[in-house]
Image (tube, coloured by chain):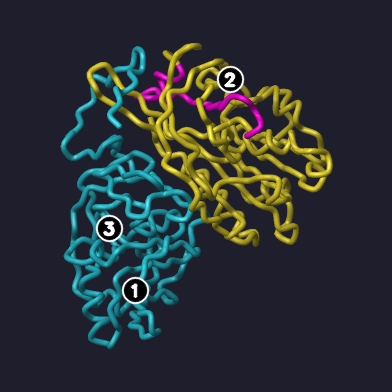
Amino acid sequence: MAIPDATAGRLEWRVATVVDVRDETPRARTLVLDVPQWPGHRPGQHVDVRLVAEDGYQAQRSYSIASPPEDRGVALTVERLDDGEVSPYLVGELRRGDGLEIRGPIGGYFVWDVALGGPLLLVAGGSGIVPLMAMLRRHARADASARAAVPVRLLYSARTPADVIYAAELERLADPPAVEVVLTFTREAPVTWTGYRRRIDRAMLEAVIWPPSAEPHAYVCGPTVFVESVASLLVELGHAASRVRTERFGATG
Amino acid sequence: MAQQPFIARGFRARSARMVDAPRLPPGQYETNDFPVLSAGPTPRTPLSKWDFTIRDADGRSARWSWDDFQALPRDTPVVDIHCVTKWSKFGTKWEGVSVDTLLAAAASHGVGAGAFVVAFCDGGYTTNLPMSDVTGGKAWVAFGYDGAALPPEHGGPARLLVPHLYFWKSAKWVRGLQLVPTDSPGFWEQLGYHNRGDPWREQRYHGDP
């Protein structure tokens, strides 16, 4: 289950350079970082970000990596929390050319790579899509036979269509039945929307995901209540707890 | 290696922030929430099937059912807790049995000593600690939080509580302690996290001082 990583050295703080900034939604922005001597990462891992003010005050937070290992830059997608301290800076203040202190990659359990196989089940709530996007992008860049061996289904719960991060890319990546992307809107959907418009529940999971006999690797990421609910439902439906990996986004500002 | 810190252009502390700075370990921030972090689904063990075991390296053990456990003398520690994901929460109120009490009872049942403990849990989670970090009034097996039963998502029916170390050492859904002569890394400790996890020394990850 757990792969010891005894070879890892100290995770040093490095000053990365922001090489690109992309607004994904009104509240979420992707920062593409050039990180000197980046050791590489696995899809699902995160980094720590440290901000130091002129007066020495410092704040640290963790953010998931959105980019696959083969991309040149390391992309973080950050959602602005209005009462937060770090996310408003990253989403509102930071510009191309700025430096940003990070260290990582961190986390060795909520990771997927081609070698682990599939089927791959991704369940995202809100900005919980970010580490799952690294997995989906990794899958999309794998060679054709590796891709064919691992069918993917993403079930993504967002408040409204405007809150969907990576919307255009998800549309491009969808290639049923190999890669299926299913959205559900919990607050507001256009009248023309024929898909789901409710929170993820047992009936939705039964309709969208594979049966336990297919032994999917499940990755669930989102707010605590969302992850508690989805992970419990997966176990109730008969999926082995050991195949359900979770990452809960607490209230981190 | 002394280095000038890198100043983040235009970053400043939120002015409204009222933090009790001396209580906050480096790199942490205070939260009033109680975030949940676990690697997998929340296990749900009925109390009728719950037990707690202390086992030594020779296989001798002491075991408590839920009712036995509730009959043990209990403490009500009020402690600050610090998660490696950067949040700290001050003045959390717990109810549980001191690990000192459990070890003394186990010893009276012939369970031998160990220099280290491995906490084992429902769901397969483990974490390792030196004996000195769980004795001397520093650790509990807690079943109550804030005047009520500890909720499952926070580790109920019972979790380890070792507040002077990062909170991943306070293993949720704990079912026992294995006493061992030599140290061996637990779940997160094998996955790049620090072997000891002292928040005041900012021992977050493998290789931190």
- Chain of the residue displaying label 1: B
Tell me the shade of chain B. Answer: cyan
Check disc 2: other Cα within 10 Å, few if <14, some if 14-19, many if 20+: some
Image quadrant holding the N terminus of chain B, namely top left
- Chain of the residue displaying label 3: B
Q: Which residue is drawn at 37% across and 66% down?
A: B183
The one of B132 and A125 positioned closer to us in this rendering: B132
The one of B183 and A216 positioned closer to us in this rendering: B183
Q: How many labels does the image show?
A: 3
Q: What amino acid is labelled 2 in the image?
A: Glu
Residue at image mark 1: B181
Structural distance between the alpha carbons of marks 2 and 3:
41 Å
Which of discs 3 and 1 lies nearer the camera? The answer is 1
The one of A46 and A78 positioned closer to us in this rendering: A46
Report if residue A31 lies within the magenta region.
no
Circles 2 and 3 on the same subunit: no
Q: In which quarter of the image is residue B150?
A: bottom left
Check disc 3: other Cα within 10 Å, few if <14, some if 14-19, many if 20+: many
